[in-house]
Structures are given as structure tokens and as C-alpha cells.
Image: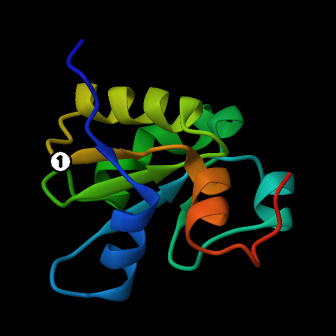
Amino acid sequence: MSAIPQISPSDLADRLGTSDSPLQLIDVREPEEVAIVSLPGFTVLPLSQFEQWSGQISQRFDPQVETLVLCHHGVRSGQMCHWLQTQGFSNVKNIAGGIDAYAIAIAPSLRRY
């Protein structure tokens, strides 16, 4: 198992603020978590619903395009990144610390839970 590359909350904020290259954004949190706080542009694919969306992952997302994965603290998104790598995704990054770290470092107005 290769190490999963990470992207920091500040790098994420920079990438979201510029559109110089295509990005695929995936949030693996549960719907009730997303209802509390979310970031625009993320496709929500709850890990608990893996069976429902996993079969279409290569049709919904381009395995060659940079893909950033978000969860609450970075654990579930790390699992998702590893799985995406096994599906042939070559440019996957885990958002270090998840949405919680993003709220602390970048957007203190975001709700935390």
C-alpha cells in the first residue's frame, strides 16, 4: 500500500480559489454531517453507501484528473483515497485534517462538530 499524498487546508483553499487545472472533489461524510457544514463543489459519496455508488466511480470521475477527498478529520477520506488508487486513480490526495482542520485554519465561520 503506497502512502496517500496529502493536501493541507491552506493548499486546498488556494486550489478552490483558482481554476487553473481541473479538480474532482469528493466528500465521503454522511448526509447528516454534510447538513451541518459542507464546502461548495464537492460530490457527496457517503462511505456507508459505498455499495450504491462504488460501481459507477470510473464513469462519474476521471481516474487521471486530480481528485481531492474530504471527511471530518481525514481518516475516512484516507480510506477512500486508498480505494480510489486500487481503482486506477493516479492523482488522489487526502485533505489533511478534514473539514474540521479547514474550518480551524481557513474558515472559522464554518460550523464545527
Q: How many marks?
A: 1
Circle 1 packing at 10 Å, graded few (<14), some (14-19), many (20+), is some
Give residue 90's position: percent from left, percent from top.
14, 42
Q: Is residue 3 above or below residue 92?
A: above
Give the x, y percent position of residue 19. 25, 87
112 is higher (above) or lower (below) than 52: below
Helix, strand or loop at label 1? It is loop
Name the residue that disc number 1 marks: 91
99 to the left or right of 77: right
* Residue placed most toward the observer, 53 or 15: 15
From this viewpoint, which residue is outermost toward the top?
Answer: 1
Report the quarter where the N terminus lies: top left
Q: Residue at x 66, y 64 (%)?
A: 103
- Residue found 37% across the figure and 35% down from its top: 81
Would residue 86 be found to the left or right of residue 76 on screen? left
Q: Residue at x 18, y 61 (%)?
A: 65
Q: Left of 57 or right of it: where is 112?
A: right
Please determine whether, in this image, residue 32 is positioned above or below residue 78: below
Q: Nearer the viewer, residue 105 or 67?
A: 105
Hey, which quadrant is residue 37 in on the image?
A: bottom right
From the viewer's perspective, tell me whether residue 74 is left or right of residue 65: right
Identify which amino acid the numbered label 1 is placed on: Asn
Residue 109 figure quarter: bottom right
Please name the residue shown 48% across and 57% down the image.
Answer: 26
Percent across and percent down for residue 73 are: 62, 40
Q: Is residue 51 above or below residue 20?
A: above
Q: Between residues 64 and 94, which one lies in front from this camera angle?
A: 94
